[in-house]
Amino acid sequence: MAGTIRFRPSVSQKDTKVAAKFSIGLDYGTNSVRAIIVDLADGQEIASDVYEYPSGDHGILLDPKDPNLARQNPADYIQGCITSVANAVKQASRNRHFSPDRVVGIGVDTTGSTPLPVDAKGRALALHSKFKKNLAAHAWLWKDHTSAEEAAEITTKASRTKENYLAKCGGTYSSEWFWSKILHCRRIAPDVFDAAAGWVELADFVPGFLTGNTAPETIRRGICAAGHKAMFHTDWGGLPKKTFLKRLDPELVKVAENYNTETATSDQVAGHLIKEFAEPMGLPAGIPVAVGAFDAHHGAIGAGVKPGTLVKIIGTSTCDVTVWPADQPLADIPGLCGIVPGSVTPGMYGLEAGQSAVGDIFNWFVRNLAPSTIPSGQDPHVWLTEQADQLQPGESGLLALDWNNGNRTVLVDPYLTGMLVGQTLHTTAAEIYRALIEATAFGALTIINRFEEYGVEVKQVVNCGGIAEKNPMAMQIYADVCGRPMKISRSAQTCALGAAIFGAVAGGGYSSVAAAQRKMTGTKDTVYRPRKKAKAVYAELYKLYHQLHDAFGVQGSGVAVDHVMKDLIAIRNRVRKG
């Protein structure tokens, strides 16, 4: 496939008469699915379409009696795929170099862990009339935290095994992950559990239905979802042993028995597009579909991840992803969401961390606490950012914790909550808004420090997502707090681009992921660099943040915090005096 690496930009293709080739990236987010079509020559996006999930509240099925519940309708996934790809293909057809038969491959990324129960043929139980209104039969969205007790139980019992099943996922199992959700379903909805022939991650479900390979025991399982969320690792032969699963619940053995343990990396082919979906999408049948993975991992590829570079996908939450050469020693790192060979790119360990809420925190503040003084018709986020940008680091005297939706890394505790310290009768909305942004930056630094504590150097950070694209103040705060350059991915759709890259590789458009990245990815010219004075003040504030972090998040830490309010006042007064 080396010849494909000599592709030139589309402008010159018409002169050299080299036929342009394209790939499709499908990005399943929390509220919508996006399809993009990109040119293999340079990664340029020639078409895109977004399908907003129609079910529930912005695509999320909720239960007013349980704020920890978050499910999704699998029908939205299927219709969203058809509609978004069909619309993108129609849009791309306006490009004279494009034709559907020039699409070499399709890649897929999704949220995760988002498992769903399926019948023996791989059809989602929620699509059966009997289970249509049963929330337990729908997809268990990544942000569903109803299984916190089961996660704690798994952590306790796994820590007592000689296999040390949690060594590769940070030492603590999460309520966001595969087995805890399934165990919780077994206990609260046994009718759903009994009716399910198996459980499939959304990242595997989509390539499965596109290729017609949906049965739980044969569907192509990606190493990304299996390794990061299902405790799958070659060190103990794949999934946890049946003896361990029996200690949790004997019925879990059935789930393992119907789980295809021949996992694959995303440069591999999951199957080929079947006529049932090809026709309504406007594509020819037979296009290779790549093995699926999680959005953050494909986003890291789309942002050009490499050793020493941390990619932050900033959205409602964040996922922080980096890679490490598989032939170099790597310690198990407590508190991470996983260390999995091949989960990001073949031949390297994929390392995942993240924060359970970032954009969600800012949106919560705007929806519930934004002041009435914001001018009518103006975006509250924009107005608050403009006001907050006039403040100096430390000027507000505020310090917040970013745990409004629990802590994903490094404490892995869904029962932790947010906090704001230092507020007075003079505190303004803009000061609080800035403090919340600073809190997420402090959380980001905590993750970086954990990586480096165990030998994984982070030299620079490449950021992706709407906040990175639209909020220079936030990016400058991140640079000042983290003490590292903050770059922005060239593509505004890095997750979808990463999926398209894997589609290109699986379809033979490139010989390797690295070769595709060199042509199809990059960063923008703007780089946010740490400012010396701001960095010094934030270093002071971070010490206080870390004391609050340990005092409220680490059992038995014994950290005294009686000085924090007074220290914040001292910093505030010094900064205001200039």
Image (cartoon, helix red, strand yellow):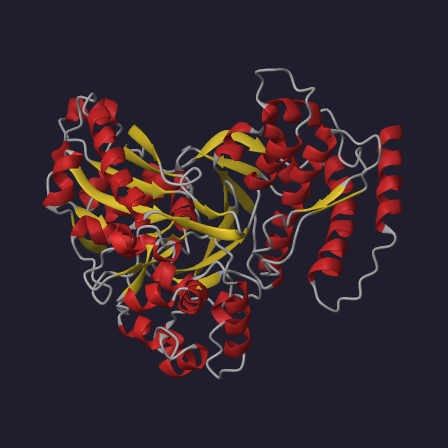
Left or right: 116 as drawn, with respect to 12: right
On the image, the x and y values in percent for residue 559 come to: 80, 62
Total labels drawn: 0
Q: Quadrant of residue 102?
A: top left
Q: Nearer the viewer, residue 137 or 538?
A: 137
Left or right: 42 as drawn, with respect to 62: left
User: Residue at 34% across / 66% down in the picture?
Assistant: 191
User: Residue at 28% across / 69% down in the picture?
Assistant: 259
Residue 76 visible in the picture: yes
On the image, the x and y values in percent for residue 455 come to: 57, 62
Left or right: 427 as drawn, with respect to 465: right
Where is the C terminus found, in terms of image quarters? top right
Q: Quadrant of residue 573?
A: top right
On the image, the x and y values in percent for residue 243 come to: 39, 84
User: Residue at 63% across / 22% down in the picture?
Assistant: 383
Q: Nearer the viewer, residue 52 or 113?
A: 52
On the image, the x and y values in percent for residue 273 come to: 15, 47
Q: Quadrant of residue 7?
A: top left
User: Residue at 50% across / 49% down in the picture?
Assistant: 319
